[in-house]
Image (cartoon, grey):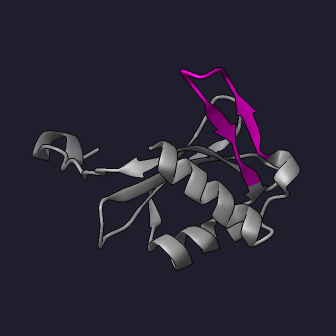
Amino acid sequence: MKKTIVTLAAFLIGLSLIPASLVTMIGGAEAQSAVLCGKRDAVVEALQKNHGEIAVSRGLTSRGTLIEVFASPKSDSFTIINSRPDGIACLVAAGEGWQEIKLPPLLSAY
């Protein structure tokens, strides 16, 4: 997981999708988290082009931001982003092992 975030950060910085100044490392030796943000359109394009990930689900939060899950149909990689109304998207999580859960017939009617 840490390797995926570092790789994604390097990739986004390398393509100038996000300036290096927007990458913030927080925490001590035991825990680090990165805040990675960029223009949503560029982030979505990079996820599709470089990781083969497409949007598989999305929803609006109570704060008016859009949470989206991107996953690759060819691998088990996934990325979750949070997009603000101003068009900036920030990485929430990225990793491997994405599994689609089929809804039972009773729930799929909703």
Q: Looking at the figure, which quarter contains the C terminus?
A: top left
107 up-or-down from 62: above or below: below
Out of 109 and 16, give the one closest to the viewer.
16
Q: Is residue 34 magenta?
A: yes
Q: How far from the left and from the top, in percent, is residue 98?
A: 31, 51
Q: How far from the left and from the top, in percent, is residue 94?
A: 48, 48
Q: Residue at x 25, y 52 (%)?
A: 100
Can residue 108 be seen here?
A: yes
Q: Looking at the figure, which quarter contains the N terminus?
A: top left
On the image, which quarter does residue 14 sit in? bottom right
Pick out the residue farthest to the front.
Answer: 29
64 up-or-down from 4: above or below: above
12 up-or-down from 88: above or below: below
Out of 109 and 35, give the one closest to the viewer.
35
For the magenta stretch, what is the residue range? 23-37
State how many labels appear: 0
Q: Residue at x 47, y 70 (%)?
A: 51
Q: Residue at x 61, y 30 (%)?
A: 32
Q: Residue at x 74, y 50 (%)?
A: 37
Pick out the residue farthest to the left.
Answer: 105
Can residue 68 be seen here?
A: no
